[in-house]
Structure formats: structure tokens, C-alpha cells
Image: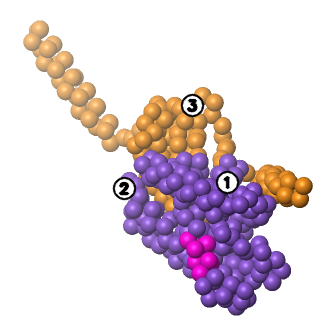
Amino acid sequence: MKRKLIIVLLLILILGLLAATAYAHGAKIEYTVKMAVEIRAAYDTGEPMAGGQVTVYAPDDPSTPWLTGVCDDKGRFTFTPDPARPGTWDVQVRQAGHGDMVHIPIGEGMATTGGTGLSPLQIALMAACVVWGFVGTALFFMGRRKS
Amino acid sequence: MHIPDGILPVAVSAAGYVSTGAATWFSLHKINQKENPQAGIPKASLLTAAFFVASWIHIPIPPTSVHLVLNGLLGAVLGYYAFPAILIGLFFQAVMFQHGGLTTLGVNATVMGVPALLAYFIFRLRNVVGKDSLAWTGVFGFLAGAGGLGIAALLAAVILVTTVPSHLDVEAERAGIYAMTLAHVPLVILEGVFTALVVVFIQRVRPELLENG
């Protein structure tokens, strides 16, 4: 009697295992939401830095490249920073000795947009101030020469 | 030509500061030997302003665009004042517009300032053939302007080509540097002509401004 019961239980177990392997023909999809960073690199003239070489540095190791890549023809490059490494990610774009580095905070203090560079008005104003400084220096020394 | 921060290895940046220090000392030493060292300052200051804004004048030369540098002109007109003038101009470009960088200030000043001094020596050769001649002033003005920029472009190319970091696509980067250097050829001619026009104009209006000892 006992033996019969054990055999029945074993059969059920085998059937169960068969059923479990049969389930492998189904599918399942998991998801986690990750955040991607898109950068756009352009020269001062506004021309996109097409083909610029991108180097991404992780916050905890700013000396070894974490990822390298190339900008598309509109100067764009997209990467997904590792969310387990919060901090400031440094992205450098370089082409023919020209280039810039942008610092992207990931994690705390995160901003959705940012960049380097100045508006044309700021540039004009600062240039005017500096030029006036040079002209003033010239006038100062001219005045001394006369007296 | 303005090499930004983060492109060059630390050793090259440091070497740039060393050579800039030496060239600045040499220039100031020569200026100090003049009868009145302050006499050239108004001229130097105005041309520093011109140098400072010249880098915003972009000239499209496909596939890229280049900007005026004017280091040859500064050399021809300012003589030994040219190196400090370029150093100060580059400093303000780096601080105000991140055009160039503070770590690479020494390298950039060497790349543009030393050819400016060479341009001055070229321009001074006109004394040999007769410095009152407008034609010779123009010819040596062209040589100084073109030579100053040409040597600077070559120096920058050599420094960049030899220091491409290995994690990049070295071949693509080098090809880019060669293309950028070639794009400077029309600019070399343009700056030569511009320098010639300026020195001929000065020679005609106030020739004493070109007398640099």
C-alpha cells in the first residue's frame, strides 16, 4: 500500500517536472527603466561636430575611459550611464585637436539639460569689456608719454 | 590652433609653460633694454585687443572653418612686445570664452608666440634691402604674416599628432588633424596679404611706428 502511494507520488512529480520544462516554450519580458544621456557637440560656429570622438569617464574613475564612441553626422551621441555609479560623469568630444568636456551630474542634483558655451550676447558683452580694458591701457600709457 | 583643456598630456602642458616662461623672460629682457620700455605699450595693447577679437572672425574653408590668428602681424609690428601681447590675449580668450584653456595656455602661447618672434626677425630683414621702400615693406610683411601663421599651424599639428591618446581612433583623429592643418593654407596666404596691407599702410602714414629695435 505504502509502496503504491510512493509510486503515485513519484509519477506526479515527474509529470510536474515535464510540465515545468514544457513551460519553457512560453516567454516573459522584464523591464527596468534606465536613463540615457544624449549629447550634441558643435563648434563655436554652430556647425555640428560630425564624427567627433566621444570618451565617457565614470565618476569614480576619471582617468580610464568608461566608454568610447563616435558622434553621428548631427554631432549627437547617446549613452546610458550606470545608475549604480552616481556622481559627475565627464564626457569629452574631440575632433582634430578641437574639443570640449561636459560634466553631467547623475543621481543627486541631476539636471535634465545643461551644457557648455555662452550665448552670443554674453560673448559680445565680455568681448567689449576686455577690448575696452586694452584700449584703456593704451590710452593710459599714451597720456603718460605726453606729460 | 587654440588647443583646449583635456586634450594634451600633463607633461606637454608643463613643457609648454616652461618654454612660455623662457620666451616671456627673453622678450621682457629685450624690451627692458630699450630706451623707453613703456613707449611700445599703447601699440601693443591695441594690437592685443585686435588679436583677442580676431579669433571670432571665422572663415569657412570646407570641410571646416578657420579663424584669423594675426600672430605674424603682431610679430612684424610689435617686435619683442608680440610675445607678451599674445600671452595676454590668449589668457583672456581662455578665461572668457574657453577658447583654448588655462592648462594649455603655455603650449598655445609657445605655438603662436614663438612664430610671432620669428615673423619679427623675418620682417626685420627688410632693413637689409632698404626699409623705406613700400614694395619691400609689403613683401616682408607678407612673408612675416604668412610665415608666422604657417609655422604656428605646423607646430600645433606636430604637437597634436604625436599626443593622440591611444583609446581614441588614432587614424581618424590624425586624418582630422591633417585636414585641419591643410585648411590653414588659404588662411596663411590671407594673413600674409592682410599683414602686408597693414604694414604698407603704417609705413605710408606713420613709418616711425614700425621702428622696433
Residue at the (81%, 83%) spot, across then down = B204
**Badge 3 is on which residue?**
A107
Pick whichever, B118 or A15, lies toward us: B118
Pair 2/3: label in front: 2
Pair 1/3: label in front: 1
Q: Secondary structure at mark 2?
A: loop
Pick whichever, A9 or A79, lies toward us: A79
**Badge 1 is on which residue?**
B88
**Disc 2 versus disc 1: distance between alpha carbons?**
33 Å
Q: Within the image, what quadrant is residue A75 found in?
A: bottom right
Q: Tag 3, which chain?
A: A
Q: Residues within 10 Å of mark 1 (few under 14, many from 20)?
A: some
Who's orange, chain-wise?
A
**Badge 2 is on which residue?**
B166
Are the numbered discs 2 and 3 placed on the same chain, yes or no? no
Who's purple, chain-wise?
B
Boundaries of the magenta span: B118-125
Tell me, yes or no, whether the two marked residues, 2 and 1, touch with CB atoms within 8 Å.
Answer: no
Amino acid bearing label 3:
Gly
Amino acid bearing label 1:
Ile
Amino acid bearing label 2:
Ser
In the image: residue B114, left or right of residue B87? left
